[in-house]
Image (tube, coloured by chain):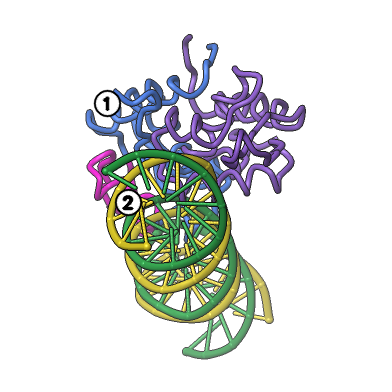
Chain colours: A blue, B purple, C green, D yellow
Amino acid sequence: MPEFAELDPLLHQSLRLAVISVLVSVESADFVYLKERTGATAGNLSVQIDKLQEAGYINVVKDFVGKRPRTNCTITPQGREALAAYVTALQTYISLKS
Amino acid sequence: MPEFAELDPLLHQSLRLAVISVLVSVESADFVYLKERTGATAGNLSVQIDKLQEAGYINVVKDFVGKRPRTNCTITPQGREALAAYVTALQTYISLKS
DNA sequence: ATAAATAGGTTTACATTATAAACCAAATTC
DNA sequence: GAATTTGGTTTATAATGTAAACCTATTTAT
């Protein structure tokens, strides 16, 4: 058993962690909302959403609201588990208080 | 005030965080000891020690024990502060329980 | 009607970073 | 004295992060 646990590289990145952090506390969130909450640029957010989706950590559904496109995101059970595991792993490095 | 704090890129890397994590709880640690505790390869450890030193987060002193070279590391006050700030910043992303 | 601006993204090019393999010098062991 | 071990450093390559540039459709202004 290594003393320091491996940190899931998908979550060990600030924007992806912020996105997951928002999604874990909300039913769903669209691109514009995530952009506002995280303060990210659209390009960066687009790329990181893709990666989270490819990892199976979030679901992405694209539809239209009126005539405007909307990209809607929700966290998956795997996403929740991955976040929990990430927090647990972090605690082998640092002690955090809630 | 952004909702998610910036994460010090120097500490947001597992090996550097592990090194600081060890050093914060120990008077000093040499290369061999850090290599054992972290499980890192020598090359990677050498590079990351350099970066922590350049950042002023650790002090590195090279001497000899008998005829053998020894690289000794200690954390600096800035290193301690940076770690504390990093933990605080992380808590804007996740709420952790000790 | 058409031009300009805005919305909602995606693609890409570039720079930075991380990592292990290769390397090196000195000391030790066979 | 040849081979191995110790204690590292240098480097080559791959992976990653990021913003600028771009794209399509819609709305607003002229």
Q: Position of residue C21 (x, y in %)?
A: 32, 61
* x 32%, y 51%: residue: A51
Indicate the quadrant where residue A77 lies. Answer: top left
Of label 2 and label 1, which has the lower sequence position?
Answer: 2
The kind of secondary structure element at disc 2 is helix
Q: Residue A39: horizontal and vertical position, in percent?
A: 58, 46
Residue B32 numbered tag: none
Which portion, as a residue range, is magenta?
A48-73
* Residue A81's disc number: 1
* Residue found 64% across the figure and 38% down from its top: B64
Residue A54 belongs to magenta span: yes
Residue D17 % position (x, y): 49, 54
From this view, report whether residue D27 is shown above or below residue B86.
below
Q: Percent from the top left, x then y, of residue D14?
A: 32, 65
Task: Check residue B98 for magenta coloring.
Answer: no
Q: Is residue B59 placed above or below B94 in the rendered structure?
A: below
In the foreground, D14 or C15: D14
Q: Which residue is mark 2?
A: A51
Work out whether A38 lies above or below C23. Answer: above
Q: Which residue is nearer to you in this view: B36 or A84?
A: B36
Mark 1: amino acid: Glu
Q: Quadrant of residue B23?
A: top right
